[in-house]
Amino acid sequence: MSVLGRNVAFLSTYPPRECGIATFTQDLVNEIKKIKLINFAGVIAINDNKTYEYDSDVKYQLQQFVREDYVRLAHELNESDIDLLIIEHEYGIFGGESGEYLLDLVDNLNIPFVLTVHTVLSNPNEKQLMILRELGEKSVKVVTMAKNTIPLLEKIYHIPSCKITVIPHGVPNFPVLPKETLKERYGFKGRRIISTFGLINPGKGIEYGIEAISMVAKKYKDVLYLILGQTHPNIKREFGEEYREKLQKLVHDLGVEDNVKFVDKYLRKKEILEYLKMSDIYMTPYLNKEQAVSGTLAYAAGLGKVIISTPYMYAEEILGEGRGLLANFRDAKSLAKHIEYIFENPEKRLQIEAEIKKLGNTMMWNNVAYRYVIMILSVLDIKSREEVVI
C-alpha cells in the first residue's frame, strides 16, 4: 500500500436488502463520501437467497451461503486497489454456523480490515467466541457503538484496548414537520402516541408493550400504540407471520383494537422520522439484556424523544443520567407505570427530552462519519509507516 493509499471499501448487507445493518452502512457511506478525505472504493454487498438491484455504490457481491465465495472474494480484493476493508459484523449476516464462513475471507485477505461489531455477547457459545476472538486478533481496529461493551471485548474476546474505539450509531438529520401537524396528517389528531419500530421478531417483547397499553388505556383512552414495521424476513421465512398473528390476537383478547395499530410495511427513513416525530413516547420493550446497539433507539434519541425501555446494554448507556426511563424486563406493569408517569408529569417529560437531545446531537450521521474518517486515516497512516519501515 502506498503512503497516499486511501481507498476504503465496506463489506455489509446493503439496500434494497431489508436489514438494519444495510441501512446503517448506506447512511455511513453517504456521509463519508461528502467528507472527501478518503476515496470510497465501494460496497461489497452480502446477498442471501434473493436477487437485488443495487445502486452504483456496490462494486462486488458476496453470496452469504456459498462458502467458496468468501475465498474468491478475498483473492479479488487482494488484486484490487482497495487499501482498507471495513467489515460490518453481525453473526447472522454471514454463512455457516454463527457466520463462520467470514473467517475463510479474513484468512485469505492480504489487506488490513477494521471490524465494526453490531453484537457483543456476554455469554457467547464456543463458536461465537472463537469467531469474534479470531476476527478481533486479525483486525487492525475494532469499532463498537457503546462504551459498556469495551470490558466484554477485552476480557471475553481478548481484544486489546488499543485496538478498540467507540463511535456511536448514527442518526439521520432530516427536517421534519411539527408533531401536531404530523398527527393531523396521519389521522391521529388528539391521540397520545407511543411507538415501537423495526423489523418485528419475538425478541422485541412487543407483547409486553401491548399489555402495558391495555393498562394505560383504562385511564387514558386516547393512547395509541403504533407497532411499526414488517416482520423480520428471516423470521417470516422460517415461521411465517406466527408472531404478528399472536400479537394481533392479544390485541383482540385485551379489547384494545382502538389503542393499538400495526403498520405492516418496510418504512423508509422519511416515514420512520415522521412517525417518531409525532410520538409522545418511544418504547423498546426488548427481551435481550445483551443487545449492544439499537438503531431504532438511536433514531429516537436523535429526535429528542422520551424513551421508555427495558434495561438492555445499549439502553442502559444511552438512557442513563436522566436521559430516559428504564422498566423491568418482561414486565407490562413496569412499562405502564413509566408511561403514566410521563403523561402525569409534563415538566419531567420536557426535562428528559432536553437531556436526550444533547446526546442525540452528537449522534448525527455527519458527526459520526467524521469520526469514522479520522479513525480510517489513522489506521492507513500507521499501515503506511509500517510499510516504509519494512
Image: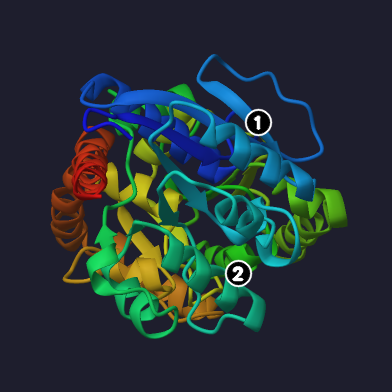
Amino acid tagged 1: Gln
Query: Left or right: 201 with respect to 42?
Result: right
Q: Residues within 10 Å of mark 1 (few under 14, many from 20)?
A: some
Q: Position of residue 316 (x, y in %)?
A: 32, 72
Which residue is rendered at x = 63% and y = 55% of the image? 102
Instruction: Report if residue 371 is visible in the image.
Output: yes
C-alpha gap between disc 1 and disc 2: 43 Å
Q: Quadrant of residue 387?
A: top left
Residue nearest the viewer, comparing 243 with 342: 243
Task: Identify the disc placed on residue 211.
Answer: 2
**What residue did someone put label 1 on?**
61
Amino acid tagged 2: Glu
Query: Left or right: 362 with respect to 133?
Result: left
SS assignment at label 2: helix
SS assignment at label 1: strand
Which residue is rendered at x = 68% and y = 18% of the image? 53
Task: Identify the disc placed on residue 111.
Answer: none
Which residue is rendered at x = 43% and y = 68% of the image? 137
